[in-house]
Structure formats: structure tokens, C-alpha cells
Amino acid sequence: MSSKVPSPVADIYKSLSISNAAWNAEIARPTGSGWIAGVHFRDATTGPFNALLVEIGKQLGNADEKTVAASFALRFGWASAMAIVPYLRFQCVPDISLENVSFKFHETTFFERTAVYEPRGAVVAGDPRGNHELMSTVETSDALMRALRDALVAQSAPVVQALFDWCSFAHRGTWGILTSSWASQFTTYAENYSDQRDVAPQLDALFAGDDIVAEMRPEMRVVSYLNEIHLYQRRASCCRYYLLPQGNLCASCPLVSDEERMERNIDWMKTQHERSLRPRGHS
């Protein structure tokens, strides 16, 4: 097939950007302020990754290095949308290897958006998109879920190691934060947001295995309010936000009791419901 035909992955990101600007991934090798090439995240002791971590520490009020590492892990975890949303909405897993991506961080150090150099991806065999020269195929939908898992783990593993090498932040701690972010992408962008129970088997499939990723997956709890049924997390590790002067314990934190977590989850659902009933333009 001619290279002049746009890659299905490029078309996916274009469609996603129309629906939600936050889902946009540039198809380019960007340069300029805030952009860090994926390969730089293999080493946190020097270079642009280290500079970002130092700036996060300053933004957090000179926080200790382990808290900075946890804070970065939260940011990096949200970048997983670049793979998870195309999977959920278009049944495609893009190539998100560190050698094929860049990440942009705002001057406030928060994650902003991503870029993909070559719009390669994988779909299930029989999908016409698999005929494009930049696409590959897997045999089944189960295999596509495994491809998503493999892509997320392969992208994240060097980052987890880099944070450990920088400040001895435990591998388990970083993985617990990352798997929490992955699960949040699934619940946030669920096909039926009002009833998220169908997401549970998807997450079971995503985290199936006998590795540290499976071990550090979040526990998902079903919480109901009126006609809404949502899944909420108990993360496997703490993000250390409560250690900051302005911080507190997140509802998903493993340090929070199950009773308090449930109460806070229901309070949040109640707030969201009440907000949905307000006329537009009213705060």
C-alpha cells in the first residue's frame, strides 16, 4: 500500500482530537519548550528527565525525592491515554515505545500531550486497517488486550527503573501508581459511564498475569448512588501527596479505611449528580 495513504493510527488520533483535545497526539518529532523525547526517560540522573524532576520538586515546595518520583509517576501514568483511548474507542494499539514517542510538560510540570513519530499500530486479524504498511495484526481480541498490556509495560518499565536508580523509590510503589492511572483511563472513558460494571472484566484481562504489574493492580469496588453504578479504586501504593503541606489522603489511597473510602466515593457521586442538574452557566 502506498505510503501516501494516511496510517489508521494517524486517523485515530485525528478523530480523537476532535472529540477531546486532551487525547490528541501529534504525528511528528517535536522540539521546543516542554518536549522531552521518550528515550530520555530511561535515565533520571541527568538530562531533561532530571531537570523535570528537579522542577517538580520546586513546584511542590522542595519536596523530598521520593515524593517527587511519586508525583512524576502520576503525570506519566496519565500519558497512558495515548494507548488506552485508541484501544477503547478504535480497537487499535499504537506503537508507544519510548523510541517512538515524546511527551510535553507544561511550565507548571503537569503532563500536557504526546507525540508519536511513526504512526504504527496493531489491530485484530481481518480488520481492513491491518493491510496498511504501518500496521500489524494479532489473532484475537484477547491478544489485542495483551498487546495493549505489553505496550504499557514495555514503555513504563525503564521509567520505573530510572526512578529507582535516581532516588531508590521502590519499583512496587511506582507500579502501583501507574496501574491506578491505567485503570482510571478505563473507568473514565467507559462506553457506559453511568454503569461501569462492564469495565471490571476488561481490567481483569488487562492485569492478568503473574508479574509485578498484576500484583500491584488496584482493587476495584462497585459503588452505587441513585441510578449510577461506578467502579472506584483502592490503589496498591500511596502517591505520597499527603506528605506535602497542601496535601491530603486521596480517596483511593491504601492508607484510607474502606469505610471512609466508600463515604467519599458516594459524596463525590452525589456532588456530580447535583452538578448535572444545574442549569448551564450556573456554578
Image (cartoon, rainbow, N blue to C red):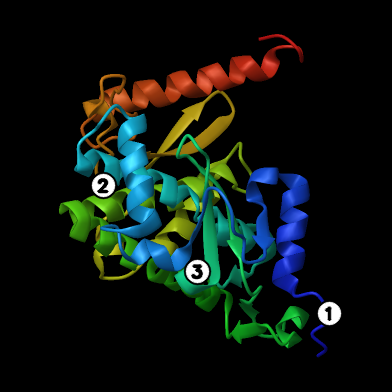
Residue annotated with mark 2? 236
- Which residue is more in the foreground, 29 or 224? 29
Q: Residues within 10 Å of mark 1 (few under 14, many from 20)?
A: few
* Residue 279 place in picture, x, y as percent: 76, 12
* Residue 33 place in picture, x, y as percent: 55, 48
Q: Spatial distance from mark 2 to mark 3, Cα to Cα?
A: 21 Å
Residue annotated with mark 3? 148
Tell me whether the residue at label 2 lies in contact with that at label 3, contact meaning CB atoms closer than 8 angstroms: no
Quadrant of the rendering where the N terminus is positioned: bottom right
Determine the residue positioned at 28% across, 41% down.
68
Q: Residues within 10 Å of mark 2 (few under 14, many from 20)?
A: many
Q: Spatial distance from mark 1 to mark 3, Cα to Cα?
A: 25 Å
Q: Is residue 59 above or below residue 75?
A: above
* Amino acid at pointer 3: Leu
Tell me whether the residue at label 1 lies in contact with that at label 3, contact meaning CB atoms closer than 8 angstroms: no
* Amino acid at pointer 2: Ala
Q: Is residue 171 visible?
A: no
Q: Nearer the viewer, mark 1 or mark 3?
A: 1
Q: Spatial distance from mark 1 to mark 2, Cα to Cα?
A: 44 Å
Q: Please tell me the numbered disc located at residue 5.
A: 1
Residue at the bottom extreme of this rendering: 1
- Which residue is more in the foreground, 43 or 192? 43
Determine the residue positioned at 37% across, 31% down.
59
Quadrant of the rendering where the C terminus is positioned: top right
- N-terminal label among 1 and 3: 1
Label 3: state its secondary structure.
helix
Label 1: state its secondary structure.
loop
Q: Nearer the viewer, mark 1 or mark 2?
A: 1
Determine the residue positioned at 61% across, 36% down.
194
Q: Is residue 193 above or below residue 171?
A: above
Label 2: state its secondary structure.
loop
* Residue 63 place in picture, x, y as percent: 24, 33
